[in-house]
Image: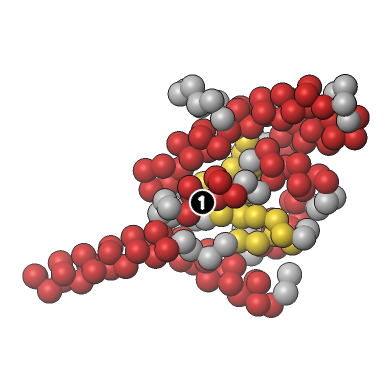
Amino acid sequence: MRHGRAKAARKTLKFFAITGNIVAPYKILLDGNFIVTVLRNKVPIVERLEKLLQGEKFHLLVTRSSLNELDALMNAFSDKDEEKSEIFRKAKQFGLDECEIIEEKSSCESAGNEISSLVSERNSNGYFVATQDEGLSDVLREMSNVPIIRLSRAVLLLESPSSASRRHASGEERSKLLNMNEE
């Protein structure tokens, strides 16, 4: 990993450790789009995540709805395009073999909705979200304390804290300052 990206990742990890209490072992929630992109680009995801997370331990997680989405896409392309169907099959198998599966109690119709419901309420479980879905990324950026990992040209990137996360952190700092001044 290049020095600049490693430094930015280190700063982002420190920010979320201080403000959101997100510490190792990290829980990385994978989206179906992310898994497909990783397999399509033949990225050694475990090795890259170790470098990105500064050698800390982590667990890969996937939601049941993400696996169901991959299954539906695999079935949709089974007759039309064998190559795409094979990628979706491999992605689903990766999710089954390499990841812990999260069974959500609520009935969400899409994987994006289920992921956003898991990290709502200030991401109390401390999930990192790895996604390629821009719509989901936009929703997650509006929430505080949600680290986002994405893949750009076979390079894993840990996005810098969103403006919502920074606003939340500065609000907490102000409240601490006001409490100190009152005493």
Give coordinates of residue 87: x percent, y percent. Answer: 83, 36
Q: Amino acid at mark 1?
A: Asp
User: Is 182 displayed left or right of 36 in the figure?
Assistant: left
The residue most toward the left is: 182
Give coordinates of residue 140: x percent, y percent. Answer: 49, 49
In the displayed structure, 59 sits above or below 170; it is above
In the displayed structure, 63 sits above or below 146; it is above
User: Is 7 displayed left or right of 3 in the figure?
Assistant: left
Q: Secondary structure at mark 1?
A: helix
Write the residue at 91% across / 29% down. 82
* 20 vs 68, nearest the viewer: 68
The residue most toward the bottom is: 3
Classify mark 1: residues with Cα within 10 Å, few (<14), some (14-19) or many (20+).
Answer: few
Give coordinates of residue 14: x percent, y percent. Answer: 49, 67
In the displayed structure, 168 sits above or below 135; it is below
Write the residue at 76% across / 47% down. 37
In the displayed structure, 91 sits above or below 145; it is above
Quadrant of residue 8 within the rendered picture? bottom right
Write the residue at 56% across / 54% down. 148
Q: Which residue is mark 1?
A: 138
Q: Could you tell me if residue 90 is visible in this image?
A: no
User: Is 183 displayed left or right of 162 in the figure?
Assistant: left
* 44 vs 149, nearest the viewer: 149
Quadrant of residue 32 within the rendered picture? top right
Q: Could you tell me if residue 31 is visible in this image?
A: yes
